[in-house]
Amino acid sequence: MADLLHNPYIAVTAYYTVTGLAMILFLTIFELVTRYRVWDELRRGNLAVAMATGGKIFGVANIFRFSIEQHDSMGQALIWGSFGYLLLLASYFIFEFMTPSYNVDQEIAQDNRAVGFIAMVISVGFSYVIGASLSL
């Protein structure tokens, strides 16, 4: 397998595929921990959910970008990218914890765009911190 990854076309395809599958898994996990149904809310045009979900997608992709760049093997990139995802998931729970006066999931489900925007920025911002930390 390692010899195949020396071909740049195969390497790009392999990293793209593995990251895509990880993205599906991680978005499914996000779907399980939120109180709203992402795809139903998107169908209804809920912009707050779109922003929060877009931030999560960007965050996961950005973490994997750093992980792929910093690690020599696909296995290491997947392990560190998964660890980075767990940290990103933790940042979502910290956001919920830091706002005791209201429920983040409920506000996003009600299309509170301000909360959706902050959720997006938290995901994007922390993905940069997490990603940069993967190179230590």
Image (tube, rainbow, N blue to C red):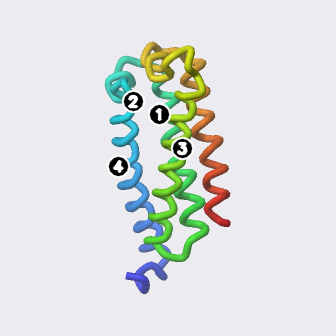
Mark 2, Cα crowd under 10 Å, few <14 / some 14-19 / many 20+, is: some
Quadrant location of the C terminus?
Answer: bottom right
**First in sequence: mark 3 vs mark 1:** 1
Quadrant location of the N terminus?
Answer: bottom left
Give the vertical position of 45 relative to 58 (above or below): above
Q: Label 1 belongs to which residue? A: 53
**First in sequence: mark 4 vs mark 2:** 4
The tag on residue 58 is 3
Q: CA distance from mark 3 to mark 1?
A: 9 Å
Q: CA distance from mark 2 to mark 1?
A: 11 Å
* The image quarter in which residue 13 lies: bottom left
**First in sequence: mark 1 vs mark 4:** 4
Label 2, secondary structure: give it: loop
The tag on residue 34 is 2
Give the vertical position of 70 relative to 106 (above or below): below
Q: Amino acid at mark 3?
A: Phe
Residue 12's spot in the image, x, y percent? 47, 67
Q: Residue at horizontal 56%, vertical 58%?
A: 65
Q: CA distance from mark 3 to mark 2?
A: 18 Å
**First in sequence: mark 2 vs mark 1:** 2
Q: Residue at horizontal 45%, vertical 23%?
A: 105
**First in sequence: mark 3 vs mark 2:** 2
Please tell me which residue lies in front, 36 or 14. Answer: 36
Q: CA distance from mark 4 to mark 3?
A: 15 Å
Asked whether the residues under the numbered discs 2 and 1 touch, taking CB atoms below 8 Å apart as contact, a structural biologist would say no
Of tags 2 and 1, which is closer to the observer? 2
Q: Residue at horizontal 67%, vertical 57%?
A: 132
The tag on residue 119 is none
